[in-house]
Amino acid sequence: MSKVVLAYSGGLDTSVIVHWLKHERGMGVVTFSADVGQGEYLEPVGERALEIGAVSAHVSDVRQTFVDEYVIPSLKAAAVYEEGYPLATALGRPLIAAELVKIAHEEGCGFVAHGCTGKGNDQVRIEASVAALASDLKVIAPLREWSMKSRDEEIEYCETHNIPIEVTRAKPYSYDRNLWGVSIECGSLEDPWSAPPEDAYLMTRSPQDAPDEPVELVVGYTKGAPTSLDGEEMGALGIINQLNKIGGDHGVGRLDQVENRLVGIKSREVYEAPAAVMLHRGLRALEALCWGRELSHFAGILSERYARLVYDGLWFTPLRESMDAFFNRAHNVTTGEVRLRLYKGSCTVVGRRSPHALYDMHLATYTPEDTFDHSAAEGFIKIWSLPVKSEARQARGK
């Protein structure tokens, strides 16, 4: 009997897939579920996979690896896709693919399977990562093969075959959750004119229901990585967990955008990412304080490219490793603290300080303490304007 290792979330799609691979394809199904910060949503999935028919079920806590090797590099790279998506799901896929490859070799599986649709981004991310790490493994994508076209048909399949699921027709949302954020799809969200219902959100309170008084937090960074919260030193994982709770209580981190998928279609996406929004905003404030103009502007070019690379599933490439080297070097000076104010869905930087700050108050001030040499400006402007004057004369034919 051929064996296949399935990336198993315990949700609707992958629960159907366990049964389908076993009974329709005659395969021994090994499942892998990664704890990347889902909390209580992960606990029963191993038992559920075995109940449905898996021959073995692996559940691994990879939260620390996720933070250290995927989240922090993307934070340093200012990697947000298009209108602000911090790439939570996209960052988790290469990690999951790497674990699938590892388990496939341990269990003697010749196949890897996933529950991604034929028009989604995640199929590319997983399969490109598997190709980079173990090109000998074959990939099975049941949602590209079977005849079921909708989630309602999958729910009916589960009811027919007594497959335990938590999804209902009344709340047909599809979630992908990790510690860096939640991706929410399906149901009424597919209409870009329709506002997301409150029952679609998992992590954040409605801004209207958030506290009436703002709260301020001080996040400390060391070389671009978060290392303290309100003066208390702690690891990045602990900081992210706390910021998700605090930010979520204040309605911070809701994102609603129409984005361009890799496969060529536009998709309405709703996200929740309190900690990601807050940590990105804080680190950008430190960069502005500590980086020179040329470094800041050039880093912005690379950030856009880095985000697209992650979104497009090209994590295991020399380009990503090379850009990581650039950002690690650039962040040698981004050590300091940022004060964030949260209020009814907003996150505002209200203070920043660093021992490496390029900001010089004596040069910036308009008080008598001003040390800027104003007389030097006239010569600077003459030289700076010289090309403009030459081009103007050329345009006039003189």
Image (cartoon, helix red, strand yellow):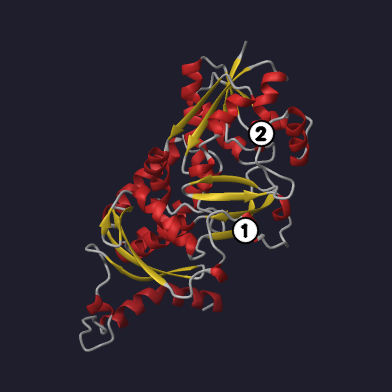
In the drawing, does residue 33 fall left or right of residue 185? left
As drawn, the label of residue 164 is 2
Is 230 situated above or below 177? below
**Residue 380 got which mark?**
none
- Choose between 106 and 225: the one closer to the eye: 106
Q: Position of residue 72 (x, y in %)?
A: 38, 47
* Residue for badge 1: 257
Question: Is residue 116 rendered to the left or right of residue 282?
Answer: right
Quarter of the N terminus within the rendering: top right
**Is 280 on the left or on the right of 233, as rendered?**
right
Q: Would residue 353 appear left or right of 18 to someone viewing this image? A: left
**Disc 2 marks which amino acid?**
Pro
For the residue pair 81 and 394, the one nearer the viewer reads as 81
Report how far apart the C-alphas of labels 1 and 2 lie in the structure.
32 Å
162 shown above or below 244: above
Q: Secondary structure at mark 2?
A: loop
Q: Are marks 1 and 2 in contact (CB under 8 Å)?
A: no
Q: Earlier in the sequence, mark 1 or mark 2?
A: 2
- Residue 379: x and y in percent read 30, 80
- Residue 395 placement: quadrant: bottom right
x 67%, y 35%: residue:
13
The residue sitting at 74% across, 27% down in the picture is: 161
The amino acid sitting under disc 1 is: Gln
Residue 74 placement (x, y as % from top left) = 43, 48
Label 1 residue SS: strand
Measured as percent of width and height from the top left, residue 4 is found at: 59, 20
The number of callouts visible is: 2
Residue 142 placement: quadrant: top right
* Label 1 packing within 10 angstroms: few (<14), some (14-19), many (20+): some
| Residue 398 appears anywhere in the view | yes
Q: Nearer the viewer, mark 1 or mark 2?
A: 2
